Image (cartoon, helix red, strand yellow):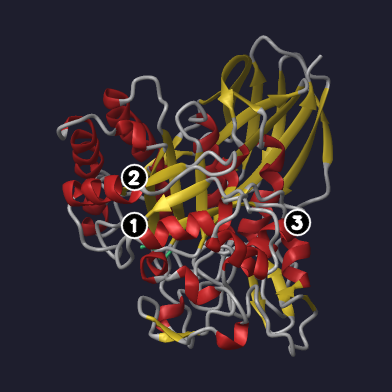
Amino acid sequence: MKAVQRVVVSPQEPIAQIKPYLHGHFAEHLGELIYSGIYVGSDSTVPNTDVIRDDVVAALQSLHIPVLRWPGGCFADDYHWRDGIGSREQRPLRINRHWGHTEEPNYFGTHEFLAFCRAIGAEPYFAGNVGSGTPAELSDWIEYCNFAGRSTLAEERRANGAHEPFGIRFWGIGNENWGCGGNMNPEQYAAEFCRFRNYASSYSGTEMQAIACGQNSADWGWTRRFFEYMQRNHLNRLGLVQGVAAHYYCGTAGTATQYSHAQWLELLAKAYAIEGAITGCRAIMDEYDPERRIKLIFDEWGTWHPVEAGKPPGGLYQQNTMRDACVAALTLDVFHNHADKLFMANIAQLINVLQALLLVSEDQCIKTPTYHVFDLYKPHQGAQAVRFITHADKVTDGGAAAPYCRTRYRNPKPFALRAVHGSASVRDSVLCVTVVNTHPAEAVELELVLRRAQCEEVEVVTLAAEDIHAHNTFAQPDFVHLSAPVTLQVRGDRVRIPLPAGSVARVQGSLV
Ligand code: AHR
């Protein structure tokens, strides 16, 4: 591989505004996410405000989380919202059927979730229950939350402490209804969607955004058959759909903390392949919705490693290394480069589950490398995405991955990607470029070329570690952290930036 790798950024070529929602998150009743991750009892010694952990709120406030999806996941299609309102002592004890048959005390319900959203400044996104619920149940939840006038449900909300309606806009009509949400085929789900959507009203100035269950990974048949049914079944029902939410997990290669260089590349290549899922999904949707009125969402994405030894198998607890950081950065860069096609994306999940931003244990809360990527990438939120072109060499895993892995990701060749990927945006004449050195062993000198634009100097912040397996632990919570900013001079139309192996960097400069 060449030591110098070139990328070109073209601030004069806008793509679209990067909706802040592309940096969205997801919190399911699963493992130790809600209970102990957010909610601690009122008698807890962990500092909290009305049962919600203060350290978690403080860590998340500064990230500017735009949207938070809840209560699942698979849990959503087994959740009955009335279980989670009213006096906590009176709430029923249920079984969390999908995630290890653990106890679900329902202490964290609608009001607690919304208090948490307010504390961290996130807009709520509710996932409704289609698999085991009824249209009436979902309709009641919406009325309870959003109706400003007089009705028994609105009065009940007031009696539970919320005089004003919550104004929840985003409502998922089920989750993974091709699987844990009811094992339906696309036509069955489309019919259910129409039935549930019919009773899901807009109230009191809050315009309902009904989000349909979308495809998993490369299951194009789901998207096509859903849209086909919606458009052609007796009457065109596409008007009922405001969004479609697909899922894309890049999975694992090795374990969360143990992997070879080939497995590093395999996982990054699988993560990068989300680009094909975005363009493929949008291409099918465009056939039915050429004006792109229906929003494309990826409301679950990220890594999925084997559960950490000693943790309950149903809790999906995993460590988070520099490899997860590179997956997050690559994926966010793909989202920015397709800002014209995507409306929202939610990484799975917020705390203690899958590709978490925070790991929490008793009274300790640590930030993962993935957290630092979201922090580093914040300036992209709401900015104008502009063209980013990589001319970097291709790197491959040399065909080391097991054949079934390659088949699953529709990739018969060795996993490959460029040595440098990234994205760029402009806001108020400030250029922000983010880049990932995808190579696990080779540092590169990045040559960043500005096409028809000028900057005098740039400020660079890097997320890097000597060892590609580096991660934060409760004993060493800041082992992986962002570097201090470094200022570099731009010479002519280009600037050289050192990028350590397996690192992420943000480059910012004022355009003159
Ligand atoms: O994020 C964990 C699970 O992954 C979710 O509950 C489900 O929607 C998906 O299969």
Side (left or right) of 95 relative to 496:
left
Callout 2: SS: helix
Would you place residue 282 above or below residue 200 in this image?
A: above
Does 268 sit left or right of 464 as displayed?
left
Q: Nearer the viewer, mark 3 or mark 2?
A: 2
Whether residues under marks 2 and 1 lie with C-beta atoms below 8 angstroms apart, the answer is: yes
State the residue in front, 9 or 497: 9
Q: CA distance from mark 2 to mark 1?
A: 8 Å
- Is 67 rendered above or below residue 91? above
1 or 3: tag closer to the N-terminus: 3
Q: Given the image, on which type of amino acid does mark 3 rest?
A: Gln
With respect to residue 361, does 133 lie above or below?
Answer: above
Residue 221 visible in the shown view: yes
Q: Residue at x 33, y 51 (%)?
A: 196
Residue 198 image label? 2
| Most foreground residue, 385 or 83 | 83
Q: Is residue 420 visible?
A: no
**Mark 1 neighbour class, 10 Å CA radius: few under 14, some 14 to 19, many 20 or more:** many
Q: Is residue 234 left or right of residue 41?
A: left
Q: Position of residue 13 (x, y in %)?
A: 58, 14
Judge the density around disc 2: few (<14), some (14-19), many (≥20) Cα neighbours within 10 Å: few
Image quarter in which the C terminus is found: top right
Q: Residue furthest top?
A: 452
Q: Which residue is mark 3?
A: 61
Residue 483 percent across, percent down from the top left: 78, 51
The residue tagged with tag 1: helix, strand or loop?
Answer: helix
Q: Earlier in the sequence, mark 2 or mark 1?
A: 1
State how far apart marks 1 and 3 are (Cα): 35 Å
Residue matched to label 1: 135
- Locate ligand 1 by image quadrant: bottom left
Q: Residue at x 83, y 40 (%)?
A: 486
Q: In which image quadrant can residue 276 be found?
A: top left
